[in-house]
Image (cartoon, rainbow, N blue to C red):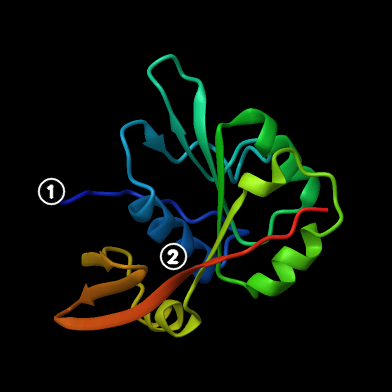
């Protein structure tokens, strides 16, 4: 695939783990119309979104541990809602259990392997070049000639 150049600003409230999860989510969900809206400066917007040519949001991509009210709103705003977390996915899923979330059954929750993120955080630089390969839910990130690998796992959610 062709290289993708990203210029990503780190919001003062954003941890390095959140930033890297956001960048990996961008790569994993890459499609025409994907962008970083003002999601961190604009709390009503998702950190990442895929919009069609009319500007309508097709995919709401959230990061971390968004609350149930936010996921309810996301379910109404976009055809597909995806969350990539760098936190404990079981805890995130539990925080949504029993809550009112629009189209909960279709919500997708993925976790990025913590050792992979920890290794990327340790190598984080102002200017960073890496290659990312994805095979069957497994990520291979090549940074400075080293391959760091880890899984991206989808977690089942129980509605209600």
Q: Residues within 10 Å of mark 2 (few under 14, many from 20)?
A: many
Residue mark closest to the camera, 1 vs 2: 1
Does 160 appear above or below 38? below
Q: Position of residue 68 (x, y in %)?
A: 78, 50
Looking at the rendered structure, which numbered label has been put on residue 2?
A: 1
Q: Secondary structure at mark 2?
A: helix
Please tell me whether residue 132 is drawn above or below residue 50 in the rendered image: below
Judging by the rendered image, the residue that carries numbered circle 2 is 20
Query: Along the line of sight, which residue is nearer the eye, 130 or 139?
Result: 139
Give the left or right position of residue 2, taking residue 45 as reference.
left
> Mark 2 or mark 1, which is nearer the start of the sequence?
1
Q: From the viewer's perspective, tell me whether residue 94 is left or right of residue 134.
A: right
Q: Nearer the viewer, residue 39 or 152?
A: 152
Q: Residue 44: percent from the left, percent from the top?
A: 68, 36
Q: In percent of the image, x 61 and y 61: which residue is there? A: 64
Q: Position of residue 5 (x, y in %)?
A: 23, 49
């Amino acid at each position: 695939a062709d290289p993708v150049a990203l210029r990503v600003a780190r919001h003062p409230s954003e941890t390095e783990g959140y930033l890297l999860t956001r960048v990996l989510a961008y790569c994993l969900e890459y499609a025409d119309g994907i962008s970083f809206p003002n999601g961190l400066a604009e709390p009503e917007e998702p950190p990442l979104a895929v919009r069609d040519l009319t500007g309508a949001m097709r995919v709401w991509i959230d990061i971390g541990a968004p609350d149930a009210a936010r996921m309810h709103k996301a379910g109404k705003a976009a055809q597909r809602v995806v969350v990539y977390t760098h936190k404990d996915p079981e805890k995130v899923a539990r925080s949504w259990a029993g809550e009112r979330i629009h189209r909960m059954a279709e919500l997708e929750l993925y976790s990025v392997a913590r050792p992979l993120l920890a290794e990327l955080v340790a190598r984080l630089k102002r200017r960073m070049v890496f290659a990312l390969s994805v095979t069957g839910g497994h990520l291979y990130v090549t940074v400075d000639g080293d391959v760091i690998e880890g899984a991206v796992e989808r977690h089942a959610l129980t509605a209600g």
